[in-house]
């Protein structure tokens, strides 16, 4: 009863921020994302009557913070299958976790797919997406392939993600610029609980459907400029809500702002590049494939940057043959 899965992280163009049901993780609005080829989690899960307790190793370390959440998710899977065996979970990220690169998306998508398979459950993509959502909302979007929509839904059964387009649909790129690998002080889950305290939250909610409609049109027509302008203003709007929540959430570091300003400068020089940000200090630069080398050169000149990770649109979370133990 052992299985291994690899799952991509994803970057949301229209963001999930705020829930209508904390326990079921139902989002306040729908969201749109793209899977990322170079930010992945690989996870092996084994269930066995020989394990006295659940054990978890993430990036070769015991992680007490994540343990509770992982065990709760294993419990959901055990309950679905009607088993009580304990599990061994070993997980590896190929990027720094908890710094705004959505390790919970790839992590819980990989855990869901590997644990379901190891338990002998035969689940559809929809069922896997619903299950992944229970562990971390954004993880439900790493289950389907390529460009993805998470429909808000109003029950657990209607809130899941599906693919809008496969990964080879559009040659756009997410250049992740790591300005610091420091872990964020406030987790996304905790941060989300204060979202509704922002006076701007109701305003944000009132136009989310319109934004989703628009981004779908820009995706369909591959209108990169309109697409870029919308995703950049969406990221800033989400951060405006974060900053005006009680307690306020300020995830940016000075170098985060420096990168955002550089993006504005590069655009005035004629390079079509836009930014988006999640909960953390690192910046996602969205550009077209043809501009990668130009931007990579520009980035080489910025000394404060710790790491650059180039991502193309990626496939879905899936089972692989190579186990981690
Ligand atoms: C800013 O999915 O990490 O990245 O459901 O509490 O685990 P939980 O939250 P999570 O939130 C992601 C927030 C975001 C925006 C997004 O990815 O849509």
Image: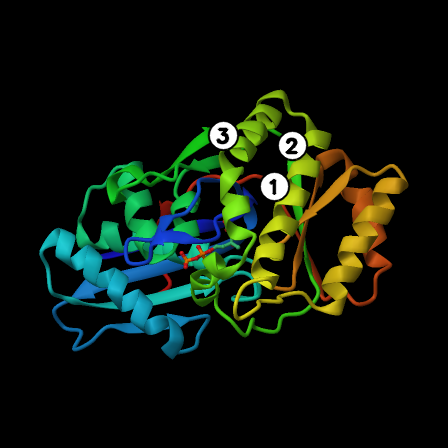
Q: Dot 1: few (<14), some (14–19), or many (≥20) neighbours within 10 Å?
A: many
Query: Mark 2 near mark 3, Cβ–Cβ under 8 Å?
Result: no
Using the image as rendered, state which of residue 164 and residue 298 is in the foreground. 164
Q: Residue shown at 62%/67% (left/top)? A: 250
Circle 3 is placed at which residue position? 166
Q: Secondary structure at mark 1?
A: loop
Closer to the camera in the image, 284 or 15? 15
- As measured in the structure, the alpha-carbon distance from the residue carrying label 2 to the one carrying label 3 is 11 Å
Query: Circle 2 — which element?
Result: loop
> Where does the image place residue 172, in percent across and percent down from the top left?
65, 36
* 56 sits left or right of 58 in the view: left
Image: 287 above or below 164: below
Asked if residue 219 is positioned above or below residue 254 in the image, the reply reads above
Q: Is residue 101 left or right of residue 174?
A: left
Residue at x-position 29% and y-position 37%: 158
Query: Can you identify the residue that label 1 sits on?
Result: 312
Disc 3 or 1, which lies upstream in sequence?
A: 3
Residue receiving disc 2: 171
Instruction: Please tell me which residue is depicted at 47% across the width and 36% down the height of the picture.
Output: 148
Where does the N terminus fall, quadrant-wise? bottom left
């Amino acid at each position: 009863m052992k299985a291994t899965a690899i799952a991509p992280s994803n970057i949301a163009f229209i963001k999930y921020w705020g829930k209508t049901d904390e326990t079921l993780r139902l989002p306040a609005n729908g969201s749109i994302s793209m899977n990322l080829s170079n930010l992945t989690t690989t996870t092996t899960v084994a269930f066995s009557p020989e394990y006295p307790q659940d054990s978890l190793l993430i990036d070769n370390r015991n992680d007490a913070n994540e343990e509770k959440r992982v065990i709760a998710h294993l419990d959901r899977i055990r309950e679905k299958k009607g088993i009580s065996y304990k599990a061994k979970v070993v997980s590896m990220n190929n990027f720094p976790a908890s710094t705004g690169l959505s390790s919970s998306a790839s992590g819980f998508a990989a855990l869901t797919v590997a644990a379901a398979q190891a338990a002998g459950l035969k689940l559809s993509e929809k069922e896997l997406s619903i299950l992944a959502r229970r562990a971390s909302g954004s993880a439900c979007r790493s289950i389907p392939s390529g460009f993805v929509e998470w429909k808000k839904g109003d029950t657990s059964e209607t809130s899941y993600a599906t693919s809008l387009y496969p990964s080879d649909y559009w040659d756009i790129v997410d250049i992740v610029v790591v300005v610091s690998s420091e872990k964020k002080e406030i987790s996304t889950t905790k941060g989300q609980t204060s979202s509704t305290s922002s006076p701007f939250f109701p305003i944000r909610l009132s136009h989310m459907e319109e934004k989703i409609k628009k981004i779908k049109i820009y995706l369909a027509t591959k209108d990169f400029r309109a697409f870029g302008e919308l995703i950049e203003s969406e990221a800033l709007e989400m951060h405006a809500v974060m900053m005006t929540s009680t307690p306020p959430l300020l995830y940016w570091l000075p170098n985060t702002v420096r990168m955002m300003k550089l993006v504005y400068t590069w655009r005035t020089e004629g390079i079509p590049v836009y930014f988006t940000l999640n909960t953390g200090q690192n910046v996602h630069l969205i550009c077209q494939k043809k501009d990668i080398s130009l931007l990579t050169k520009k980035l080489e000149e910025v000394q404060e940057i710790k790491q650059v990770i180039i991502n193309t649109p990626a496939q879905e979370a899936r089972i692989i043959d190579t186990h981690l133990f």
